[in-house]
Image (cartoon, rainbow, N blue to C red):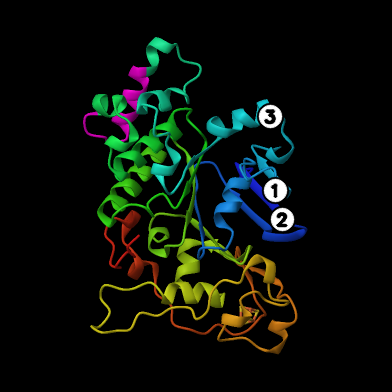
Amino acid sequence: MSVPLLQVVNLAVTFRQEGVETTPVRSVSLTVHAGERVAVVGESGCGKSLTALALTRLSPTDRARVSGRVLFEGTDTLTLGTRALTRVRGQGIAYVFQDPTASLNPVMRVSDQIAECLPDLRRADRLAAAIDLLTKTGLPDPARAARAYPCELSGGQQQRVMLAMALAARPKLLVSDEPTTALDVTTQRHVLNLIDDLTDAYNMAVLLITHNLGLVAGRMERVYVMYAGQVVESGAVTDVLARPRHPYTRGLLSAVPLLDAPRNTPLQDIPGTVPSPDAWPAGCAFAPRCTDDEPRCHTDQPPETLADGRMHRCWPRPQTGQQKTPTALCGSRGRSPSIALPQP
Ligand code: SF4
């Protein structure tokens, strides 16, 4: 296979506060190839967003220590100087975050905010370029939207503005961090379809950060499942969702509500919560919530098992558990879902 566009090797993010060190991201490795669609899935608090921010050193520099390697087109972003890193941000890797209201500047017109992403254009050409980008995102009346302040736009329209800003420098990788969490379900689907269409048109790779497996099925090619700051399973989406090997992945799949489930079928969840980074369990971090645990799980870290192009972090054992197939989860490119997508 070709050299990856992005290769993350043993990434760790450590915070030191009041003399106490915590490592919410520990030894994450992942790859994204040019034009590929890759998802990182896990519950809140698993380190997904911190991993995404660390790719371009956006984690709070005064408190966070980032180690490992983040090779983007072969160059380690963790060692780049400020000027080169600024080029990677935007032109190489662009972000769409989950809350557009918090990401946009409330006292700047939309066109001025998009123009900041177009520094090479003459000032006189920037408004037209901003309107052109907003048109590509499907915003109704893009000329009016360009002159508006963010508060004059709906949440879905604001997220389209964020997409226009992300696309302005024609990045090679779009990192979408829970891009639809703050939107209603109908708008979620419009925005996700728009991301699909635009990344196709611009031939961009996508790294989607989400807790929603329904978004992964049918849209993404490979998936990394994160738990407690580690990747616990990875592989092709079709394989991982059809035959999950890690109990946590099976738990996430069981928690997805199905539209065709019999009436009054109780919703399933994974008992307990993600442990805090300052109290990672000694052995497998999932052991306190795992129904397959055994004594060694509580004392020893399970090994990474690599087989058939997949990885999972668990003691070798016969596979059990009922799985939902990707077809049951979602139709082609996620546009004909048979699941009830969770409300944001
Ligand atoms: S190592 Fe043990 S506790 Fe951890 S996921 Fe595997 S079976 Fe469960």
Which structural element holds mark 1? loop
Up-down relation of residue 199 to residue 314 (above or below): above
Q: Is residue 215 magenta?
A: no
The location of residue 181, given as percent across then percent down, is 39, 55
> Going by the image, does 340 lie left or right of 178?
left
Q: Is residue 205 above or below residue 126?
A: below
Percent position (x, y) of residue 307? 63, 69
Q: CA distance from mark 3 to mark 1?
A: 18 Å
Q: Nearer the viewer, residue 77 or 282?
A: 282
Q: Dot 3 corresponds to which residue?
A: 82
46 left or right of 209?
Answer: right
The quadrant where ligand 1 appears is: bottom right
Residue denoted by label 1: 63
Query: Which is more N-terminal, label 1 or label 2?
Result: 2
Q: Mark 3 touching mark 1, by CB under 8 A?
A: no
Outermost residue toward the front? 18
> Answer yes or no: do the residues labelled 2 and 1 have beta carbons within 8 Å?
yes
Please give the range of residues in magenta: 127-141
Residue 19's quadrant in the figure?
bottom right
Q: What kind of residue is marked 2?
A: Gln
**Does 148 sit above or below residue 228?**
above
Q: Quadrant of residue 108?
A: top left
Q: Position of residue 206 (x, y in %)?
A: 48, 46
Closer to the eye: label 3 or 2: 2
Callout 2: helix, strand or loop?
Answer: strand
Quadrant of residue 139 within the rendered picture: top left
Q: Amino acid at mark 1?
A: Arg
Q: CA distance from mark 2 to mark 1?
A: 7 Å
Q: Secondary structure at mark 3?
A: helix
